[in-house]
Amino acid sequence: MTPENPVAGWYPDPQDAAMLRWWDGAQWSAQTQPLPTEPPQTPPWQAEPGQPYPPPVYAPRESVPQLGGLRFGAWIWIGLAIGVLLPLAVFFSGFSGGFDSFSAALLVLGAVLVAGIVLMFFPRLRGLGTGLLISVAATPIVTFGVCVVMLSASGFV
């Protein structure tokens, strides 16, 4: 079937206005039937006569409300901020809890990773989990940038 041909189906017979004739998608067939008195109910998956393709049927996607009524994107930004700032604060504050600051920051980053993965299983918290997981990738880049700025401000670089 080419795009300019109508889809296969029953159409008004071009030779007899009281009859329907079967169009196979390429040519008229010999099959005919009387024109119905009421218009048929066309299922949504079939094309209307004269339309080359059936119109698309879209099911609206149900939105899952996020925690606190905030939008999904807002929770991504919140998770990103938490996931980047928390390890950076541990790294630069000198809080070690018995570890050197680098190891403590890595433990916090690992906790952020685990929290992000766990939150992905809860639809209302999926935005926060997405932000936390993005932050796991962003934190090393941000840390490197902060270190470069600090070294250049101190005149080391």
Image (cartoon, rainbow, N blue to C red):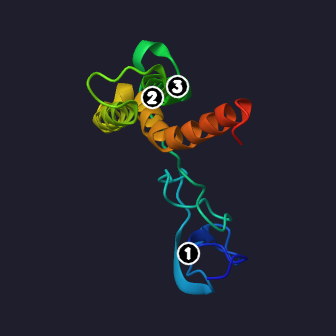
Comparing marks 3 and 2, which lies closer to the viewer?
A: 2
Q: Is residue 148 above or below residue 87?
A: below
Three-letter code, disc 1: Ala
Q: Write down the residue under mark 2.
A: 91
Q: Residues within 10 Å of mark 1 (few under 14, many from 20)?
A: some
Q: Write down the residue under mark 1.
A: 8
The N terminus - image quarter: bottom right
Q: Is residue 60 visible?
A: no
Disc on the earlier residue, 3 or 2: 3
Callout 3–callout 2 Cβ contact below 8 Å: no
Three-letter code, disc 2: Phe
The C terminus - image quarter: top right
Q: Write down the residue under mark 3.
A: 81
- Identified at 69% across, 38% down, the residue is 156
- Identified at 29% across, 37% down, the residue is 114
Place of residue 141 in the rendered image (x, y in percent of width and height, measured from the top left): 57, 43
Q: Is residue 108 left or right of residue 51?
A: left
As drawn, the residue found furthest toward the top would be: 68
In this rendered view, identify the residue nearer to me: 138 or 115. Answer: 138
